[in-house]
Amino acid sequence: MEIYISQAIHGITYGMLLFLVASGFTLVFGLMNILNVAHFAFYMLGAYFAYTISHYVGNFWVCLVVSPIMVGVLGLLTERFLIRKVHKEGHEPELLLTFGLFFISVEAVSIIWGPASIPLQGPEIFEGVVPFLGRKTFPLYRLFILGFSFFVALGMAVMLFCTRIGILIRATVADADMVNALGTNTQALFTGVFAIGSALAGIGGIIVAPFLSAHPAMGMDMLLDCFVVVIVGGFGSLRGAFLSSLMIGTLHSFGVLLIPRLAMVFQFLLMAVVLSIRPTGLFGEKE
Amino acid sequence: MKTAALKIEKVSKSFSGLQILDRIDIDICKGERHAIIGPNGAGKSTLFNIITGLHRPSSGRLFFFGNDITRKSIHKIARLGICRSFQIINVFPEMSVLENVRNAIVSKFDRRFNWLSFLNSDEKINKEANRILDLCELGDVKNSPASQLSYGLQRKLELALVIAPDPILILLDEPTAGLNVEETRDAIKLIRQVTEGKTLVIIEHDMEVVFSLADRITVLNFGKILVTGTPDQIRMSKEVKDAYLGRE
Amino acid sequence: MNFRSCFKLKYFIIAGLTLIVLIFPLILSPFRLNLAIEMLIFSLFATSFNLLYRYSGLLPFGHGAFFGIGGYVTALLFNHLAHIPLLLTLSIAAIAGLVAGVFIGLFCIRLKGAYFAFISLAFQMFLYTLAFSWRTLTGGDDGMGVTRPDLDLPFLSKISMMDEGNIYWFILVIVILGIVACYFFLETPIANSIVCVRENEIRASFLGYDPFLTKLVNFSLASFLAALSGSLFVFFEKFIGTSSMNLDMSLTVVLMTVIGGSGHFLGPALGASLYILVQDWISNLTDRSWLIMGILFVFVVLYLRGGVISLFQSEKMGKIRLLIRGRGN
């Protein structure tokens, strides 16, 4: 019994983490119609930058602040100088470009930091375990992941629904030209959201590193999972991403528990089912 | 009339709560030339979209010579012999004029999946394509990419794509939109010529075109039929005058 | 007069190249010959990819799945049903690819653009996981070695496939046949339908074309050829592993086609050949071949959209060639 509860919590934790990363990806798509595969490179770089920073400043919290900023800047530059060049030519060149950038990042990381996993230490106060349902224990750090991701998600919701900027963003998703015509600099908005999305991905990478370790293939692993999230939830829908992240996270946990080697099959089946019934995802727009 | 060529039965359509068409009832006879007119936004193009299968009606049914085509897919309806043109030019931009028309001919001869012959050397298909091009006065530009044609010629290509499959029912959506007076007169002549013996439904704003081509006219306003009748009846109709000119 | 001599020159060059290609086994070292064989196999694979990419306008990120299917089916046949004639084995493997293509296509083709790209990737990853986990059938991560059968031609003698020259010529013939078949295929009405649907799907529907079916036919054909190339690969390497079915394989073919240039029929073949040559050359210099490939790829996407082959296409040629195969991006 305990194992089901603990797996469930684990599943929700992983789901929240998925949401943290997938939300940036789907928001950028909903807003700018950009399929940014490089998002997952930013995820990976977040962890790696943090690792390097941690050599100079041992404090985890400092890394958690500085690294995303670096990733955000990188995202900004990418959008400004690379993606904008190919955006008007349609999805395909953009997809190819961002994939190429992802690819290059993975190779560069392998070369600079080596192909093996790198250890990133979590904050000391979250080391150790917490007593849980009698004699069992539960790692404190995972609760931190759960809490932190939830907190970030909440912050995003507040920003999108309660602030002026949030309203502008949602309006631009609905009708960018109109918002532009009404005087808002939508281009700046786009760049800003892109940068923030990238930073969020970076945060995801940092958070996950002490837990699942950071390695050059982490971007691809997250890509595949997030991709299922976004397909099921619908490209562009944050609500969809939230629900499907939790679904996928739980499915993943229980899949690993029940049939370890074919855990991927469940995700895949879910995706196939959703695609057959509702190709644009649970909350996606009808094409 | 016997079995109508096209029977539109109480067709309604709403998009996200906005009612575009409201219980449209029209019977079109074989060989008839029927015009649909009405102010912008009256739902005319939507009606065409529904007839040809691009949209499904929210309610109501459509019959083509007694055949229920309400829920049929676009390509199946097209193969039954219903062909339409578009208000905004909708051709194959990077293909040459000849290739454009040839696409229609390949489909007409049911050779869409033919893998045993070479298209460029197929006499039958190419001959027929050239015939259509000459009919529509496009012979001179047959090797130019469609996107490089002048607007007037692109309109002719639109027309060519409609008649090439030799359809039974032709739907023309504002075929003279954007043409000047001379080009319009040419277009009327061409349309009359190529639609000889076929059933024609035409959406138009240009009254000269309407009155010179149509046997009967339906006036749509806000998605409802105002009146259906002969050109003379429409000319006399008070409702039409009110709708177009507004109540004094 | 000028035109005439151009004409002759072109044929002379082609004849010359053909001759050189034919005598490769006699003039190249075994190592270089192996490279040539790889170039052939991947040219076929990339050409099959381009059928989808350029002619249907679909970008699959999981095309490697069919390469892998062709490979595994071939390996299983070689190992368990060794007495089957070689040509039959290859045919069965290619047909397996075709069947898989129909099945997977039924799911993927409903979607467009990025959705299509990723769902095809998902199917491929699924098959990869299957290959990885089903150790008893596929050897899992370790893969399977195969014995290469000889070629038994009905009225001629047995041709030994131990000899490298024979292997090369055999693969050369099959690849050339495949590519030439593709070339002539593009002249048929069915290829016209495929392009027509890509150019303007709505208008094509209104002319009576069934877009779904048309794309499915193209998808199946592409998977047939991909499986054939995977089959030849196993025949050549005498080994199949999960690397033939993994993400790298799918991405590599994308890289090859984009770098070579999808706008010309032979662009993918050029890209595949360049890729293999450059990879070989770079890996002698440095460990970083993937990185350099990635940078080259991004460079091509940003600045040379038509690929390397566009450097050889002059503008005038592009305007004159209004036939299906001459269409630019």
Image (cartoon, coloured by chain):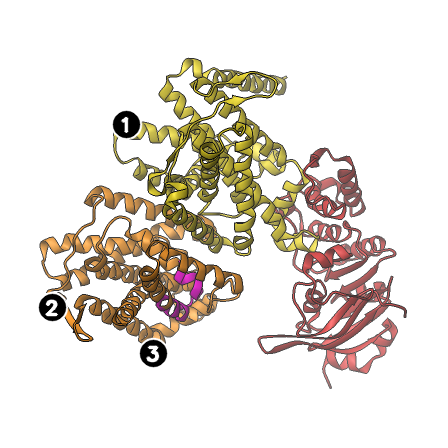
Is the stretch drawn in magenta largely helix, strand or loop?
A: helix
Residue A107, percent from left and from top: 28, 43
- Magenta residues span A228-246
First in residue order: circle 2 vs circle 3: 2
- Tell me the quarter of the picture where residue C79 sits: top left
Check disc 3 and report its element: helix, strand or loop.
helix
**What letter labels the chain drawn in yellow?**
C
Residue B114, percent from left and from top: 70, 41
Q: Mark 1, residues whose alpha carbon is within 10 Å: few (<14), some, or many (≥20)?
A: few
**Which amino acid does the dot numbered 3 rest on?**
Cys
Q: Badge 2 sits on which subunit?
A: A
Q: Which colour denotes chain B?
A: red
Residue A94 visible to an observer of this rendering:
no
From the viewer's side, name the closer residue of B144 and C167. C167
Relative placement, left or right, of A43 versus B11 is: left
| Badge 2 vs badge 3, beta-carbon distance below 8 Å | no
Give the numbered dot on residue A125: 2
Relative placement, left or right, of B24 versus C179 is: right
Disc 3 from disc 1: Cα separation:
58 Å
Give the numbered dot on residue C284: 1
Check disc 2 and report its element: helix, strand or loop.
helix
From the viewer's side, name the closer residue of B150 and B25. B25
Q: Badge 3 sits on which subunit?
A: A
Residue furthest right as drawn: B1
Per the image, the residue denoted by label 3 is A162
Q: Is residue A63 above or below residue A169?
A: above
Same chain letter for marks 2 and 3: yes
- Tell me the quarter of the picture where residue C280 sits: top left
Same chain letter for marks 1 and 2: no
Q: Nearer the viewer, mark 2 or mark 3?
A: 2
**What letter labels the chain drawn in orange?**
A
**Which amino acid does the dot numbered 1 rest on?**
Asn
